[in-house]
Image: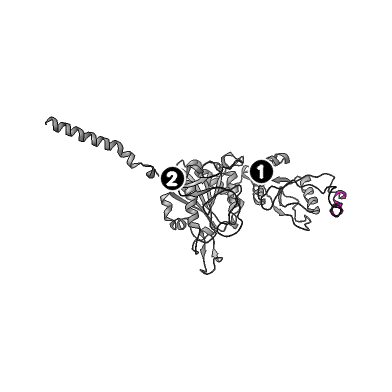
Amino acid sequence: MSEAKRTSARRAFLVVVAMLLFLPAWLFSADDQPLPKILIIATGGTIAGVQDDPNDPSRYRAGSLSAQDIIKSVPELENHAVIETLQFSNVPSTEIQPADWLRLATLITKHLNQNSSLAGVVITHGTDRLEETAFFLHLTVGSDKPVVIVGAQRPATGTGADGPANLLAAIRTAASPDSRDRGVLVVMDDRILSAREVRKDYPRVGGFLAGRIGVLGASGPEYLYSPTRPHTHRSQFQIDPTVFPDSSTPNSTSTRLAEVPLLFSYSGGLGNQFPQTAEGVVIATTNTTCDESLALQVLARNGTAVVAAFPTGESVRKLRPIQATAPARVRETCSRLEGDPRWQGRWIPPIPAQLMTPQKARILLMLALPKVQDREQLAEIFSRY
């Protein structure tokens, strides 16, 4: 072989080697990275609802479609994640019970901690009780991986169904590394909401307003804030998934939830609806009537933990007994309190729930009471969480 041919052959060989060296860069460009794996846990709700009357969107059967049915309606999901599904239940959210919260928290924690390839979890849920389930999971899931709850205000088969767009947004949020360690998130209408503050204000698209910490942009979630109060793997109320490995209803005292009724204060209230044997009660109020104040004192002196929460979740001021500076009519109406033998001359103010709706204050008290009974320690928990 001539020198010219050998030179040409060497050049051709070097070109081939160079192409092979750069080939992996072509095959694994940023757009071709392996997709994250997301587990969808379906519980039912309007997002899985079937509309019976096409002319009446209020007539539909919640919890009718399976998880597989739901994802088939959103083919674009496969562009953002590898999807796995698990059918937890298929009911309206009003049928979700505290025992279901425990099972769900355990299931999520087990999957996130035992499956290293799992990037996050998305839960489809009815909107009526979505904020309660979200807050319970916010306090009990023992992982920093994204947990996103999503629902819909219109049934899946109805005109203008919002479920598919919400589900796609939830998947994109759960698949993003930026969503880690932000607690449990609720995604509705391209808003990313914290489970700590989220609230359903009205049953229409856009009805979830409070608690926005981010939005869904063209490139994925864009965060404005991060929750600062304890949550998920930072919470003292994490559920131990080894307590009931088959995900059945827990029977260990370490996972027991206290019985806590939710009460309302109202004009003319006598406090006669207040239970005398509850471990704890939460009262939704801006202030209490004289008779309600007396009833609360009886509960507090008998060892019942009493928590007061503002009906809309704003900061509740510390409730106080009627003061000497109150108007004469008020002092006269409430003067019998001081002479009532049940009053005993001292006022035990309810523990204030700061920036927390009554429903969420109840959940926190249900989790706290099996661990803590001291009033000052309970007050500290409500101050921190």
Q: Magenta segment, which residues?
A: 315-339
Q: In this view of the protein, which residue sits in the foreground, 315 or 149?
A: 315
Give the x, y percent position of residue 357: 66, 50
Q: Is residue 237 left or right of residue 340?
A: left
The answer to whether 235 is drawn above or below residue 56 in the figure is above
Number of marks: 2
What is the spatial separation of the Cα atoms under label 2 and label 1, in whole angstroms? Answer: 35 Å
- Image quadrant occupied by the C terminus: top right
Callout 2 amino acid: Pro
Front residue (pair 90, 297): 297
Task: Give the x, y percent position of residue 299.
Answer: 77, 48
Identify which residue is drawn at 43% across, 45% down: 36
Q: Secondary structure at mark 1?
A: helix
| Quarter of the image where the N terminus is located | top left
Q: Residue at x 24, y 37 (%)?
A: 16
Which sits in the foreground, 246 or 5? 5
Q: Which mark is residue 368?
A: 1
The location of residue 187, given as percent across then percent down, is 53, 51
Q: Is residue 330 above or below residue 244?
A: below
Which badge, 2 or 1, is on the more N-terminal residue? 2
The residue labelled by disc 2 is 36
